[in-house]
Amino acid sequence: MAEAKLRSVSFPRYAEYNCSFKYIIEQALGCRYVMPPALTKRTMELGTKYSPDFVCTPFKTMLGSMIEALEAGADTLFMTHGLCRLGYYGELLEQILRDLGYQFDFINLSDYDMSKKKEYIRIVRRFNPKVNYARFLLQFMEGLKMAEYVDDVTAEYYRNCGFDASGGQCRRAYQDFLTAMYTARNRADVEAGYRAAKGALGAVPLDKPQRPLRVGIVGEFYTAMDAFSNLELEQKLADMRVEVHRWMNVTNQFLRYGSGQKNLRVKVRDLSEYDMGPTSTANIWYARECAERGFDGIVHVKSAGCTPEIDVMPVLQNISADYKVPVLYLTYDAQTSDVGLMTRLEAFYDMIEMRKKVL
Amino acid sequence: MEHAYLGIDVGSISTKGVIIDKKNNILASRYIWTQGDPIGAVKELVRLLEGEFDKEKYKIVATGATGSARKLVGVITGATMVKNEITAHAVGTTTFYPDVRTILEIGGQDSKIILVENGVAVDYAMNTLCAAGTGAFLSSQAKRLGIEVEEIGGYALRSTHPTPIAARCTVFAESDLVHKIQMGHPREDIIAGVCNAVAANYLNNVGKGKKIVSPVVFQGGVSKNEGVVAAFERTLGCKVIVDPNGHLMGALGVAILARRGSGRREFDFAMEDMEFRTREAGCGGCSNNCEIICVYRGKELIDSWGNRCERGAQAR
């Protein structure tokens, strides 16, 4: 019965990837997409209010964003599976929302066996039974391509925006790019938006020293990437005239990781023998990569109570001692004041800047 | 007239101010309680410093502000240098102790460790979400035991068998402490136990994974407590240096930074009589509803902050 009309699907706000979800839901699956409102204090208040206290912060953020999506008219929520507690979050989110009295259909990837190809067809059919598979596959790949472009442009933006000599051209180019992605309806739009952004970012006059300060960001998958959740950590660092590098993103973790994962694990075997969660191997590998490439500092980001990332910290301490690279450990909870974060970041900046002059 | 430099450090519990000359000699210094009113404390501080300071011979050409209220204080004093307290402490300490390797600092609500190599800070850590094991814990326990916080050190040193107290978390430590008091442990031993707990908590939380190398300098308000100093010396197995001006180190550091900085603006002692007022305004531009703090001198708006986007800047 519900299948007869078009579904209004939503997925919680997550960094800048919602444009890609939107593209896949609308173009590839032929449903409507309900864009959840941008994350705000209200999202966090809603999420914190209905969440178990000791659950990690991304759960609270996602719950708040889901409630706001339901308020905005979504009738179907989509939730991913995961390799840490995230795998159980879908079930828990659904239960909490049902207890609150919301009516919706919940598509939870944890309910499916993701190792079987047949299961993917079942998922697609649940979204829209009339889907044309050939077209779906093509447009699904275009949606992924968009995520790749988002990662590519975002990385370039945070590398350079601190050195923008034009006073805001860099930021405008990035904003224009995001607008283009959020409104793209076909492949030509995506490609044009990407090309325009690369051109605009490339044309920004940069006032970058020969050896700029470089900081690598590692950490938990949600908090390290989502600017609202980490209180705009990357922008704050960049504004201090720092080159900000982050390997962790959807492209590197999922789209290009496949064959590389095994190699990464081999590469860090001397530091940690076992995989300790969804992102630990990659984080350890990238932290050492930063150290070996002579970065001035590493920032480790996690939400309070993220067990896999707590396990990563002792390894980072070893890397810090071996390569003499300072690591700043940041723990985020549902707080929205950035005063304490600013104190730590300013001190971190002062320290790496003074070190650079001496060493 | 010779040049002098003012440094003000407004922390959660205490407000510190120093005036130094070109050679970092202290011309005037004061340490007072903030009592939840940073503006009032700074005005009082400036008034006290003015009394000690030779205005005929010196003039203050640069002012630095640090501590958790640095932004607010920087605005109302017209500071030429506003720096975070970690950098200020590192700069102050390395100026007076050029060969220091480790700086331990425990303040009213935060604690930090700074590792130094060749006179430059190379690594630091600061307590994150929890204020366990800081000065606030010591003063609340002193109150519970009915003594002044300044007396804790003397009591602790008289103890021969310090009571073991759970050091993991302030809340647990407190209930453990209450149990031990009710069991009949002598007061000296309890207090020595509290001091040990502060040192243990610090080394387990802030100092975790950091290599503590001598010479070690200990500062911040808690460094005035001989009991905690003794606990650190015992645990670390090395001498812990406590500077007589250790409680002023943040203010000294930021005064030195103001001296080194390029900004110059003569300090006006008249600010102690001016009226400063802050007002909190909800932005209302979106559901984030940023709390914008507006600072007024008399009726004039001199600065505002707290907005996360441009919309808040217009809403002033």
Image: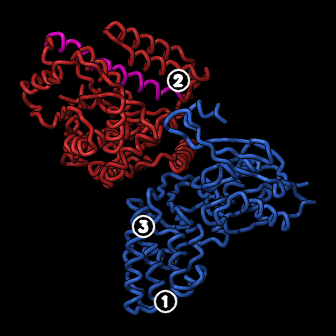
- Rendered blue, the chain in question is B
SS state under label 2: helix
- Given the image, what chain letter belongs to the residue carrying mark 2? A
- Residue A157 in the image, given as x and y percentages of width and height: 46, 25
Give the residue number, with chain letter if any, for mark 1: B188
* Residue that appears at 44% across and 24% down: A156
Q: To which quarter of the image does residue A289 belong?
A: top left
Question: Is B27 situated left or right of B253 in this image?
Answer: right
User: What hue does chain A carry in this figure?
Assistant: red
- Residue A129 in the image, given as x and y percentages of width and height: 13, 18
Main secondary structure of the magenta stretch: helix
Question: Is B135 situated left or right of A150 in this image?
Answer: right
* C-alpha separation, residue under disc 1 versus residue under disc 3: 23 Å
- Residue A171 shows which numbered tag? 2
* Residue that appears at 76% across and 63% down: B45
Give the residue number, with chain letter if any, for mark 3: B203
- Given the image, what chain letter belongs to the residue carrying mark 3? B
- Type of amino acid under label 1: Glu
SS state under label 3: helix
Q: To which quarter of the image does residue A207 belong?
A: top right
SS state under label 1: helix
* Residue that appears at 42% across and 87% down: B181
The residues colored magenta run A133-161
- Residue B14 in the image, given as x and y percentages of width and height: 64, 66
As drawn, the residue found furthest toward the right would be B56
* C-alpha separation, residue under disc 3 versus residue under disc 2: 43 Å
- Type of amino acid under label 3: Leu
Q: Is residue A155 magenta?
A: yes
- Type of amino acid under label 2: Arg
